[in-house]
Amino acid sequence: MKLTSALVPVFSFIPFLQESHGCRCTATNELTRAGANEMIVVTETEKYRQLAGVVRDMNGELVSDVLVEVYDKPEYLLLQYPESEEKKEEQHQIAACVVGAGGKFCFRDLPPGNYELRVSKAGGWNHTHVYVVIAAGKQKASKRNLEITLYPGT
C-alpha cells in the first residue's frame, strides 16, 4: 500500500448502491462531504473481486455515518501534485452509500476495471481516496475485505 497526500476538488455523481451479505450501508445521492484540508491517498497493490470492507479511525475503532463513494477514472491518484490536478479527467460517481454503526460497506458486481474509493466524514476528518482494481475473469484476485482508515484533520 502506498500513502501520499494532496488537495483535489470533487466532481459530479450518479447514485447507486449494492447491499447484501451483512452490509448495512444506506443508498445516498450525497456528494463528498466537507472535511479537513488534507487528502489521504492509498494505492492498493492487490486486485480484488469486489469492493467491500470497513471504515476505521486511526485507533482501529469502527466509524459510522461515513460516506463511501466509487468513482471512475482514478488514474490521477497515481500522480504527484500538481501533475495530478493537470491530468485529472472528469469523474462520475458510480455508487455511494453511508455506513451504519458497524462501519461496513459493499459494492458488489462492479465490472472489472480501475476505481477510486472515496471515503469522507464531516466534522474535521481528512478524506481518504483509495486506488483499487477489480480483477477481470479468472485473474488472480484477493477475496479479503478492504480496511479503510480515516484520519482526523489537523
Image (tube, rainbow, N blue to C red):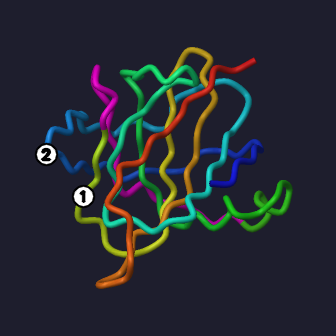
Q: Residues within 10 Å of mark 2 (few under 14, many from 20)?
A: few
Q: Quadrant of the N terminus?
A: bottom right
Q: Is residue 66 above or below residue 72?
A: above
Amino acid type, label 1: Arg
Under circle 1, the secondary element is loop
Q: Nearer the viewer, residue 94 or 2?
A: 2
Q: Position of residue 17 (x, y in %)?
A: 24, 48
Question: What is the x, y in percent for residue 19?
Answer: 17, 45
Q: Quadrant of the C terminus?
A: top right
Residue 103 part of the magenta-drawn span: yes
Identified at 67% across, 40% down, the residue is: 40
**Vertical placement of residue 102 versus 92, above or below:** above
Secondary structure, mark 2, is loop
Neighbours of disc 1 within 10 Å: few (<14), some (14-19), many (20+): some
| Picture quadrant of residue 2 | bottom right
Residue under the image location 62 percent in, 50 percent down? 42
- Whole-percent x, y for residue 49 in the image: 32, 66
Q: Quickly name the residue at label 2.
A: 21
| Residue 125 percent across, percent down from the top left | 60, 23
Type of residue at label 2?
A: His
Number of labels in the image equals: 2
The magenta stretch spans which residues?
88-104
Q: Is 133 drawn above or below residue 19 in the view shown?
A: below
State yes or no: residue 30 in magenta.
Answer: no
Q: Which residue is mark 1?
A: 108
Give the Cα separation between the discs numbered 2 and 1: 10 Å
Residue at the left extreme, as displayed:
21
Q: Nearer the viewer, residue 134 or 72?
A: 134
Assess whether mark 1 and mark 2 are in contact (beta carbons under 8 angstroms): yes
